[in-house]
Image: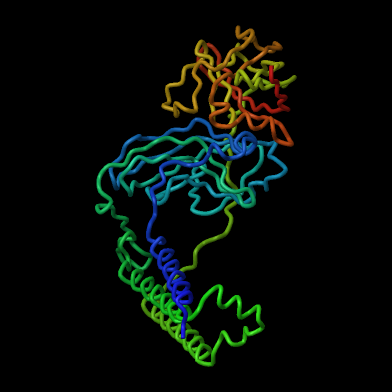
C-alpha cells in the first residue's frame, strides 16, 4: 500500500512539472537592455559608434525606420576579447518588435557575418520594419565571435497600431508568394502540441510511483535495480520507436512538400570597404589622464599638433557612446539620446584656435554624472585601466577633424 507521504510527494512533483510547463507560455515584456552592465573597456576600446541617425522616433506597424551612421574599429582592441574577424552587424531590441529588412556595411548587403579590420572606419545602414506596438529601446550592436555582443547607443522608438495587422510578404525563388508571419502557422502549432503531449505522457508514466526521497532511499539501500521494471523498459522502447517514426514521417513529408530548398548561408563575407579620409590631420599625444571619483570628472593633459590647413578648436570628446561637448565650439542638433549627451560637459584650459602647424599642451576635463550612471568609471578598477575615445576638432567653417586617443587612466579620490 502506498503511504500518504508517497502520494503527497508524487503529486507535488507532478504539480511542479505542470507549473514549469505552464510557465513556458509566459513571456514578460522587456523594454530596455543592460548596456550599463557591459564592461567599460568593452564600450571604450572595441567599436566606436558615431554620426548615428535614427530616421524616425515614432512609426506605425508595417512602417520602416532606418538606423545609419559610422563605426570605428579601435586599433588598440583589448587582448581579452577575440578580434572582430567574424562579426555580425545587428540591432539590439527587446525581442522581435522589429524585423530587419536590410542591412549594409558601406554599399554592400551584409545578411551574414563579416570580417572587420582593426583601425578602420566603416559606414553602415540598417532598415527595420515595425512589428509589435509599444515603446522600445533600439540599439546599434555588433556581435563578435568570441567577444559577444558589443552594444552601441540606444534610442526610444514608439510603434503604434496593432500587431494583428503586421504582414511580412515574400516571393520565393520558385515564384510562390507567402506571408512569413503566418506561413505554416497551423503546422508549427501542431508539431509543438504533439511533442508537448508526448512529453507530458512520458512524465505522467514515470511519475506515477514514488519519486525523489523514496527513490533516493532505495538507491542508498542498494536496491536501484528495482526502480526500473520490465514494463518500464517496454514503455521506454515504445516511446523511442514512436519518436523515431514520428520524426521520420515529418522529415519525409517536409521533403515531399518542399522539394526545392537551399541551406542557410553561413560563410563569412570579406572585403568590406572602409571609409577613407575620416580621421583628420590633428595629432594628439596623451601625456596623462586621471579620473576624479568625487567629482565624476576625467582630466587629460594633451599635447596637440595641428597638421591641417586651418585653425581648429576642441569641440567634443566621446567615449563609450557618451558625448562631452563644449557649447562655445559645437552644439549637437542631431537628436542624439539625451541621457548619453553632456552638452556642457567639456572644458579646455585654453581653447583658442590652434593655428596650422602649431603645437599646444592643454588640460581637457570631461565632467558629467554619465560617468557613474553608465558605469564608465568602472574602468579604473580594471586590471588594464586604459581609456579610449574620439576627440572632435572644428575649424571656423564648421569642418570636423577626428582623432582617436587612448592611454592609462589613474583614479584620484580627493
The percent coordinates of residue 178 (x first, y second) are 30, 63
In front of the other: 246 or 30? 30
Colour scheme in use: rainbow
> Along the horizontal axis of the image, is 342 left or right of 102?
right
Where 316 sits versus 172, above or below? above
Question: Is 288 left, or right, of 57 in this rendering?
Answer: right
Q: Is residue 239 left or right of residue 26?
A: right
Residue under the point 51% across and 21% down: 342
Whole-percent x and y of residue 6? 48, 76
Callout count? 0
Looking at the image, residue 340 lies above or below residue 393: below
Q: What x and y, as percent, mark residue 367?
A: 58, 18
Q: Is residue 390 above or below residue 242?
A: above
Residue occupying image coordinates x 52% and y 46%: 89
Tell me which corner region of the image, top left, top right, bottom left or bottom right, holds residue 155: top left
- Rendered location of residue 220, percent (x, y): 65, 78
Quadrant including the C terminus:
top right
Q: Residue at x 62, y 52 (%)?
A: 145
Q: Compare residues 277 and 51 and report the one nearer the observer.
A: 51
In percent of the image, x 49 and y 64: which residue is there? 264
Foreground pick, 284 / 318? 318
* Residue 79 as seen in the image, left or right of residue 370: right
Amino acid at each position: 500500500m502506498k503511504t500518504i507521504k508517497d502520494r503527497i510527494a508524487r503529486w507535488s512533483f507532478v504539480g511542479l512539472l505542470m507549473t514549469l510547463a505552464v510557465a513556458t507560455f509566459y513571456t514578460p515584456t522587456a523594454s530596455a537592455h543592460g548596456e550599463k552592465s557591459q564592461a567599460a573597456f568593452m564600450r571604450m576600446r572595441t567599436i566606436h559608434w558615431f554620426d548615428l541617425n535614427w530616421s524616425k522616433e515614432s512609426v506605425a506597424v508595417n512602417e520602416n525606420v532606418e538606423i545609419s551612421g559610422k563605426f570605428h574599429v579601435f586599433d588598440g582592441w583589448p587582448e581579452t576579447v577575440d578580434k572582430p574577424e567574424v562579426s555580425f552587424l545587428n540591432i539590439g531590441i527587446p525581442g522581435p518588435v522589429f524585423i530587419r529588412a536590410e542591412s549594409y556595411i558601406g554599399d554592400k548587403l551584409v545578411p551574414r557575418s563579416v570580417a572587420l579590420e582593426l583601425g578602420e572606419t566603416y559606414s553602415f545602414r540598417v532598415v527595420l520594419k515595425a512589428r509589435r506596438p509599444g515603446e522600445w529601446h533600439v540599439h546599434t550592436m555588433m556581435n563578435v565571435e568570441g567577444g559577444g555582443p558589443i552594444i552601441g547607443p540606444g534610442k526610444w522608438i514608439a510603434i503604434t497600431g496593432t500587431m494583428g495587422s503586421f504582414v511580412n510578404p515574400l516571393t520565393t525563388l520558385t515564384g510562390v508568394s507567402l506571408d512569413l508571419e503566418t506561413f505554416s502557422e497551423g503546422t508549427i502549432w501542431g508539431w509543438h502540441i504533439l511533442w508537448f503531449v508526448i512529453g507530458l505522457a512520458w512524465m505522467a508514466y514515470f511519475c506515477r510511483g514514488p519519486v525523489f526521497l523514496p527513490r533516493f532511499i532505495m538507491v542508498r539501500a542498494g536496491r536501484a535495480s528495482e526502480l526500473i521494471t520490465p514494463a518500464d523498459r517496454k514503455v521506454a522502447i515504445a516511446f523511442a520507436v514512436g519518436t523515431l517514426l514520428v520524426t521520420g514521417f515529418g522529415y519525409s513529408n517536409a521533403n515531399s512538400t518542399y522539394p526545392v530548398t537551399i541551406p542557410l548561408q553561413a560563410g563569412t563575407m570579406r572585403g568590406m570597404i572602409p571609409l577613407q579620409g575620416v580621421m583628420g590631420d590633428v595629432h594628439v599625444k596623451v601625456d596623462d589622464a586621471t579620473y576624479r571619483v568625487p567629482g565624476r570628472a576625467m582630466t587629460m593633459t594633451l599635447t596637440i599638433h595641428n597638421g591641417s590647413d586651418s585653425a581648429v578648436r576642441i569641440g567634443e570628446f566621446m567615449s563609450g557612446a557618451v558625448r562631452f561637448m563644449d557649447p562655445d565650439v559645437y552644439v549637437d542638433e542631431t537628436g542624439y539620446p539625451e541621457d548619453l549627451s553632456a552638452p556642457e560637459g567639456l572644458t579646455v584650459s585654453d581653447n583658442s584656435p590652434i593655428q596650422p602647424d602649431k603645437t599646444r599642451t592643454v588640460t581637457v576635463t570631461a565632467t558629467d554624472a554619465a560617468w557613474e550612471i553608465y558605469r564608465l568609471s568602472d574602468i579604473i578598477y580594471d586590471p588594464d585601466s586604459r581609456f579610449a575615445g574620439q576627440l572632435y576638432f572644428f575649424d571656423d567653417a564648421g569642418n570636423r577633424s577626428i582623432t582617436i586617443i587612448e592611454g592609462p587612466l589613474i583614479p584620484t579620490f580627493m
